[in-house]
Amino acid sequence: MSILRIGIWTLLALAGLACENEEEYQRQVDRAIQKALQERMVQYEQNKRAECERRILEAAKQQADSIILAEARLAVRRKAKPPKPDKPEKPELKPLSDTAALKPVLSDSLRSPDTNATK
């Protein structure tokens, strides 16, 4: 009977190990699935982020080009025709402060050319 008992216990132990191995195998499969799923999710997020950054940069580039073009057009319009300057006001005529009689600077300057030649 002891051999029969040992055989039964051995069979029960092997059955228990088989069940544990099946559970462990299922856990490993679940872990592998979770790992693959995580990797795919990370890859998907990276792809979405890269696409979003590309669209943002494209929109920023178009906006910058529009701003540069608008500034260039404005500069051309400004340089094309400068505004006319305002007319200066007429200066105010100031009366002369010196009202003395005019005198010749040189005494000979009042004589006629004929009289200068006879001397």
Image (spheres, grey):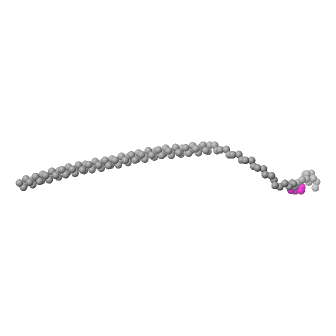
Q: Is residue 68 magenta?
A: no
* Image location of residue 90, percent across then percent down: 74, 47
Pick the residue in front: 99 or 116. 99
Residue at point 53%, 45% (across, down): 67
Q: Furthest residue to the bottom?
A: 106
Quarter of the image where one finds residue 80: top right
Report the side of 24 relative to 56 (left or right): left
Quarter holding the C terminus is bottom right
Query: How many numbered callouts?
Result: 0
Q: Quick check: 29 left or right of 105?
A: left
Left or right: residue 43 versus residue 89 is left
User: Which residue is found at the position 17% from the left and 52% from the top?
Assistant: 17
The boundaries of the magenta stretch are: 104-108
Residue placed furthest toward the left = 1
Residue 88: percent from the left, percent from the top? 71, 47
Q: Position of residue 60 (x, y in %)?
A: 48, 46
Q: Is residue 105 magenta?
A: yes
| Quarter in which the N terminus is drawn | bottom left
> Viewer-proximal residue, 95 or 61?
95
Q: Residue at x 89, y 55 (%)?
A: 108
Magenta stretch secondary structure, dominant: loop
Where residue 9 sits: x, y (%)?
11, 53
Which residue is drawn at the image coordinates 41% and 45% (left, top)?
A: 51
